[in-house]
Image (cartoon, coloured by chain):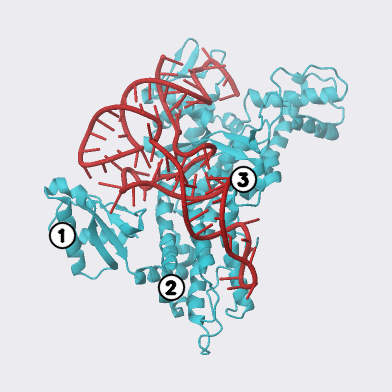
Amino acid sequence: MKDEVIKAVRKALESLGVTNIPDIEVDIPKDEAHGDAATTIALNLAKPLKKAPKIIAGEIIAKIKETPNPFLKIEAAGAGFINFTYRNDYYHGKLGQLLEKEHDFFRADIGEGKKVQVEFVSANPTGPLHIGHGRGAAVGNALCNLLRSAGYEVEREFYVNDAGMQIKLLGLSVYTSYQQMLGNDMPFPENGYKGDYVKDISVEMKDEAGDKYHNIPFEGCGDVFTAFAYKKMLAALSRDLSQFGIGFDRWQSEKELYDKGAVKDALEHLKKNGLAYEKDGALWFRSTEFGDDKDRVVVKNDGEFTYFASDIAYHKEKLDRGFDTIIDIWGADHHGYIPRIRAVLKAFGLSEEKFKVILVQIVSLLREGKPVQMSKRSGEFITLREVMDEVGADIAKFIFLTRRSDSHLDFDIEVAKRESSENPVFYVQYAFARISSIFRQAVERKIINIEHKINPPIRPLEKGGKGGFESIHDIDLTLLKEGDEIALVKKMLLYTLVFDGAVTALEPHRITYYLQELARLFHSYYNRHRVLSDDMDITTARLALCKAVQIVLEEGLNILGVKAPERM
RNA sequence: GCGCCUGUAGCUCAGUUGGACAGAGCAACUGCCUUCUAAGCAGUAGGCCAGAGGUUCGAAUCCUCUCAGGCGCACCA
């Protein structure tokens, strides 16, 4: 919708002899009175051309009107805006294209096949996923879908912290629980993991190994317990995520980075390039060189690596694997790490703008407006699994995507469960289901002979008793003259713009809002006009319109990772 | 003390990367089911965009300061 305006304005300016034409910015006005698209080019040219904006606007308009164009109206307004209104045939033409190409109509190639790596969730495998991880998972998943639709080659990755102190502590917790179960009176470790899952794993251990490790000190069998607990936890993580509808292309183990020497190599590389130095018996990364506040220790004076050391190796690996852009999705409480990771990537030669961090804010869990306490210490927290079981994955995902990711989110479990208008998921899904229902009716009434699926073209059985349609071109879309029909088409074309914005800003929530707006227009249309009527020509045209809406709804829901149900 | 994020209707939040009179949902009130799904629709009401300066044709949006809330500032993981 913007392209035609840009083209027309550029041509006009060229034939007016304007050189150095700046970027022609086009907005979609909020107010219908300002047309379908508007440009501020006359305002922007006022200074360089030393002319009043209104005069420039007048000249541009006159020029455009001299040549064929898709506009019904072009007028100057306000301080120097130029407002464009398209003729209906423009919209009918676009609708035809949409119906012909279906989902391909929206396939953009912004990414040009560039490789993007998105790392998200990356929860420690020491406890179940909580609701905050769920939000990160929903955002990451939608973002990956978005980028893939935009023509990027996307790899989804989960980084598994299986090498540090915490995983050992998990092993020790399970070990202790196991010993206690066998009657061994042993104090639970100070910072141990106290959740029920620890007990569950120790029970599984006992089922498998019996009392084989009874009274054997942790030094003697700790590795067995740690490995066992880790395996169980990772399996649980993976299972929960896949039930949530989220899959990863790769699970990168931190331990593996150590085992194959990647950490050592990365640090060697830094040393060789003078980016690491020894001080006070420790090895430091010169991160201040790349904008960090202070240099960071990577090897402690006791010879142990810091957690940051493996992060360096990990991010170096990402670069070595040839990604053009690296996106990390973190909990907002990790924002302090951005400068140092950015420093790492810069040190290895990635330009600044190719590393992006998306911070996902805390989720506050509520029940009927009252906060649900979440405390790891007491072992009392709501897991993602519980939320899924209680409200369902689709609802949870949609709600996670109704906010900007860096904005706090209140998640009220009771409200989310309600099948009412308080719940925006249903509003959008309902629009889709309603259209499916219309198609089922149309089949029943022998208006069309296909299933109500989106993919096959509409083939009416009769048109004035002269046989059926073979293609979308046989449908007279110009019969869609109602204001709200044109408004629907306009909205559908806007999808492309919303999509582009969502991709460049890395903000999937824009799709969520768009879908609600499109659904609103459809519901309104549905209540005002009947799709199936005695007038076969109008019926067919309206069915086509409905189908287009359905395609767009499905397109958006697919990006969010939310189902488009045919019945509700 | 330093840094990051947030502050928009009673509540929860959008706001097209600086555009025209500030938007939606919920909650409140009034209507609409013999006809394609009422998980819906139509309408009413609701605002000092935290505050003060600045930048310019134009600011919720950019800059500075103030206030309020959250988070982060390890040879922890």
Can residue A551 be seen by looking at this rendering? no
Q: Colour of chain B?
A: red
Which residue was labeled with disc 1?
A: A59
- Mark 2–mark 1 contact, CB under 8 Å? no
> Whole-Å distance between the Cαs marked 3 and 2?
37 Å
Which residue was labeled with disc 2?
A: A480
Q: Tell me which numbered mark, 3 or 2, is placed earlier along the sequence.
A: 3
Displayed quadrant of residue A210? top right
Number of residues whose C-alpha sits closer than 10 Å to that of mark 1, classed few (under 14), some (14–19) or many (20 or more): some
Three-letter code for the amino acid on which mark 3 is drawn? Ala
> Whole-Å distance between the Cαs marked 3 and 1?
53 Å
Q: In this image, B75 relative to A418: left or right?
A: left
Secondary structure under tag 3 reads: helix
Q: Residue at x 40, y 49 (%)?
A: A501
Secondary structure under tag 1 reads: helix
Q: Can you tell which mark lies on residue A396? A: 3
Relative to A100, is A368 above or below? above
Q: Where is residue A122 drawn, in percent x and y?
A: 58, 36
> Whole-Å distance between the Cαs marked 2 and 1?
34 Å
Identify the chain of the residue marked 2, using the numbered disc in the image. Answer: A
* Viewer-side residue, B76 vs A483: A483
Identify the chain of the residue marked 1, using the numbered disc in the image. Answer: A
Image chain in cyan: A
Q: Tell me which numbered mark, 3 or 1, is placed earlier along the sequence.
A: 1
Mark closer to the observer (3, 2): 2
